[in-house]
Amino acid sequence: MSPSGYRHLRKGRISRPGQPYLITTICTNRAALFADWDVASATALLIAEQRLWRDSRLLCWVLMPDHLHLLVQLGDTESLGQLMQRVKAVTARGARSARERSTAPVWMTGFHDRAIRSEDNLHQAARYMVANPMRAGLAVSPGAYPFWDAIWLDGSEPTATSCGSDGSRDR
């Protein structure tokens, strides 16, 4: 995508506190950095850390070999752009560290976002994300793919703070 194309991604972007967003960010040159177990594991641990999200709420995430899907309810203290700048910076440092101090960029500039307007659309977006590894031929079921989580796994809606430091959920 050209630099002018990234501007189009931002055109009309509004950050609404409390609004859920489906966000996708892609690895530089669509490189499959997270096909490496160590890099994916290190990055998944960072994604699951509550402190990364501050007052935003991480609802669902899937780390694919060459991209990341997030379903996030935006908090009150920062814009979507500020949140994603921090998420990408923290996860890039973790991924580079797991790649033996590589200095290569991890994420492409920009990200794609879509505001989710209803509860039905929220669950539909989560199902789409969780099924992504199966559509890509990486797993035969959601449970067979290790790099994802969602707040709805146990039938309740816990906060993102229930994610353990190992990326698993407290049950």
Image: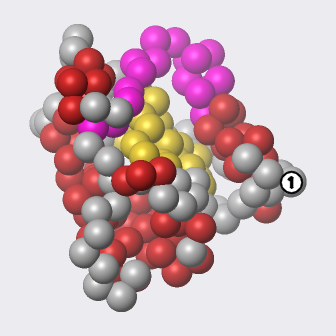
Q: Is residue 130 magenta?
A: no
Which sits in the foreground, 48 or 87?
A: 87
Query: Where in the figure is residue 68, as x and y percent of width and height?
Result: 48, 48
| Segment colored magenta | 110-126
The residue that disc 1 covers is 140
Q: Residue at x 62, y 38 (%)?
A: 129
Secondary structure of the residue carrying numbered label 1 = loop
Position of the C terminus, as image quadrant, is bottom right
Can see residue 121? yes
| Residue 122 within the magenta-colored segment of the rendering | yes
Q: Residue at x 28, y 53 (%)?
A: 87
Task: Please tell me whether residue 17 is drawn above or below residue 49 in the rendered image.
Answer: above
Q: Position of residue 58 (x, y in %)?
A: 42, 44
Question: Which residue: 48% across, 75% down?
Answer: 39
Is 58 on the left or on the right of 124, as rendered?
Answer: left
Amino acid bearing label 1? Val
The residue positioned 35% from the left and 33% from the top of the image is 1
Residue 164 seen in the current view: no
**Where residue 168 sits in the image (x, y, percent)?**
58, 67
